[in-house]
Amino acid sequence: MEYYTNNSFSHMQAFKGGQISLKYPQKLYIDLTQDCNMYCIMCRDKLTVTGKVMDMDLFKRIVDETASFVSSYSLFNWGEPLIVKDFRERVMYLTSKKNKDATIDISTNGILLDEEMITFLKSNDVIVTVSFDGANKETFEKIRRGGNFENICRNVENLARIYDEKELDKTPGIYVSIQKDNQYQLLEIAKLVNRLGIKRMGFGLVTSPDEYAPELSESIREIIKETKNYLDNEGMLNDLYPTKVGNFLWDGNDYYHESNYVVDRNCNAPFVSASIGFNGDIYLCCNVGKLVDNIDNKSFSEIWSGERYDTLRKAVNDRSLMPYRCKNCAWFNR
């Protein structure tokens, strides 16, 4: 028996640059808006476009304070970043302030990825991941309501073509939310996006709402294994995958029952990352976690180094104290 220390959160942190200062996180999510021009079945009940976005002055204040210390910025979390009207201005401002080696990434549904936007993103070295949840029109549009399968495929193909010379870990990628309606299409999705020119692919299990969660059976473990083997054989980067499926853990070439290991389930997310909502609310991690405070009348450093943050950092690894969302967190094999 041995320790099992692999987890999906470590995949997300890989190649993001090291921690520069204990006074600031390595990774910072800035959710420019919670609006979205799709309403995917596992995410929201209806189309939500309120026009509410992070105030530009607040955005600049956050960037000005953190730019010397943060190694990686994600300009998204729950919303669609490309619908923000001054999105390009924000990217250019962040690019002008951040450390040279710091990265900027976005996750997008791909609707607004026209060639002009793609060229802009490439010119600012923005790493782009497109959410892609079906191998055919029927499944894709059933899950990703408001999207057009053919248009998204065309945009993804253009994205791969225009970004052609990027390194593998910075090349455009897709992310699949594995759920009941697409769990048997994972390998076919990989083959499709490979034909479209994509060389980076990640995937994870939908855990809520329960009605959309996949069946955690031997068949889904086998499909994930086949997909990972396909990506390896095709020279594609599998940058994110579920390390735990039910009671089974991925150990290099297959899933094995967790009883074979002493599993490390400790969470370090609140020590190295933070998420800021469009309204200035600061959360423990990209999975929202617990609300810590609001940055409106405080500096980020003041909150990050504050007593409440430390109390919550302790709580996330204490079963009797941890927030509800932490108890079944897939990122840390819970």
Image (spheres, grey):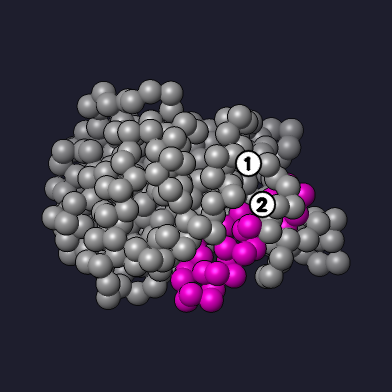
x%, y% of residue 200?
Answer: 43, 65
Crowd tier of the residue under label 2, counting other residues whose Cα lies within 10 Å: few below 14, some 14–19, many 20 or above? some
Q: Which mark is residue 40?
A: none
Residue 303 can be seen in this image: no
Q: Quadrant for residue 181, please give it.
A: top right
- On screen, residue 239 versus residue 246, left or right, reads left
Q: Amino acid at mark 1?
A: Pro
Q: Foreground: 70 or 241? A: 241
For mark 2, give the secondary structure.
helix
- On screen, residue 187 versus residue 71, left or right, reads right
Crowd tier of the residue under label 1, counting other residues whose Cα lies within 10 Å: few below 14, some 14–19, many 20 or above? many
| In the depicted structure, whether residue 119 falls above or below residue 332 | below
Q: Residue at x 43, y 40 (%)?
A: 138
Quarter of the N terminus within the rendering: bottom right
x%, y% of residue 60?
Answer: 21, 44
Tell me the residue that label 2 is attached to.
220
For mark 1, give the secondary structure.
loop
- On screen, residue 206 versus residue 91, left or right, reads right
Q: Are marks 2 and 1 in contact (CB under 8 Å)?
A: yes
Tell me the residue that label 1 is attached to.
214
Span of residues in magenta:
223-249
Q: Amino acid at mark 2?
A: Ile
x%, y% of residue 264?
Answer: 72, 56
Q: Residue at x 53, y 33 (%)?
A: 290
Residue 290 can be seen in this image: yes
